[in-house]
């Protein structure tokens, strides 16, 4: 039974081989009915083998095709999801992004903020960071959830917010 795992491993490597097996078995099974003068009928003893080869390779090719479609469509779905989630930022989102953007090294340590002065709690800031991370705007460091930075998308958003703030302060 070790040969079955070897066969599956080799099929995983060779999609061309699976395509050839599928095509050949289809021709053996259905070719005679469409081209009787060119393709002889298949023997009854070989029909079961041809059906099995066609079924196995066909399922393999369908699974491979679905995986390919998922891999190709995932970035598109992610971009649409990002656009949908980040189209509107509330004031707290914008203030949080600006806090990170104003740091010299672009990294904000939430442990260093004096929360009494700004009127929010550390937990609210951590939750806001997690919310912005889901939207693709903020990175949260894996070893310490109190350390956050802007992603490339977050930096673009911060630049737009700063420009809007600057424009509104100049018009006053």
Image: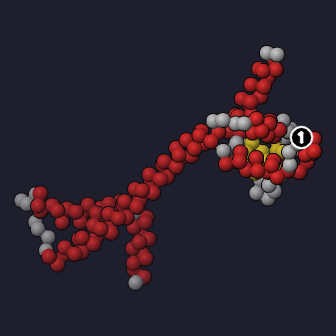
In the image, 114 versus 108, the foreground residue is 114
Q: Quadrant of residue 144?
A: bottom right
Residue sitting at x 14%, y 76%: 44
Find numbered disc 1 in the image and state the secondary structure of the residue it sits on: helix
25 relative position to 104: left or right = left
Q: Quadrant of the N terminus?
A: bottom left
Residue sitting at x 83%, y 38%: 99
Residue 161, position as x, y percentages in the image? 74, 30
Residue 153, position as x, y percentages in the image? 68, 39
Q: Quadrant of residue 16?
A: bottom left
The extreme front residue here reads: 119
Q: Quadrant of the C terminus?
A: top right
37 relative position to 14: left or right = left
Residue that badge 1 annotates: 118
Q: Is residue 4 among what the camera can see?
A: yes
In the image, 29 versus 75, the foreground residue is 75
Residue sitting at x 15%, y 61%: 31
Residue 48, position as x, y percentages in the image? 22, 75
């Amino acid at each position: 039974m070790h040969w079955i795992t070897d066969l599956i491993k080799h099929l995983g490597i060779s999609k061309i081989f699976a395509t050839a097996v599928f095509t050949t078995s289809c021709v053996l099974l259905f070719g005679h009915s469409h081209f009787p003068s060119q393709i002889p009928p298949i023997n009854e003893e070989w029909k079961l083998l041809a059906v099995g080869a066609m079924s196995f390779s066909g399922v393999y090719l369908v699974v491979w095709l679905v995986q390919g479609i998922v891999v190709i469509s995932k970035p598109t779905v992610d971009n649409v999801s990002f656009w949908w989630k980040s189209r509107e930022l509330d004031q707290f989102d914008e203030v949080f992004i600006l806090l990170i953007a104003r740091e010299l090294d672009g990294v904000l340590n939430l442990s260093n903020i004096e929360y009494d002065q700004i009127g929010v709690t550390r937990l609210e800031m951590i939750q806001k960071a997690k919310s912005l991370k889901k939207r693709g705007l903020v990175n949260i460091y894996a070893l310490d959830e109190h350390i956050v930075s802007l992603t490339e998308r977050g930096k673009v958003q911060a630049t737009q917010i700063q420009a809007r703030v600057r424009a509104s302060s100049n018009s006053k």
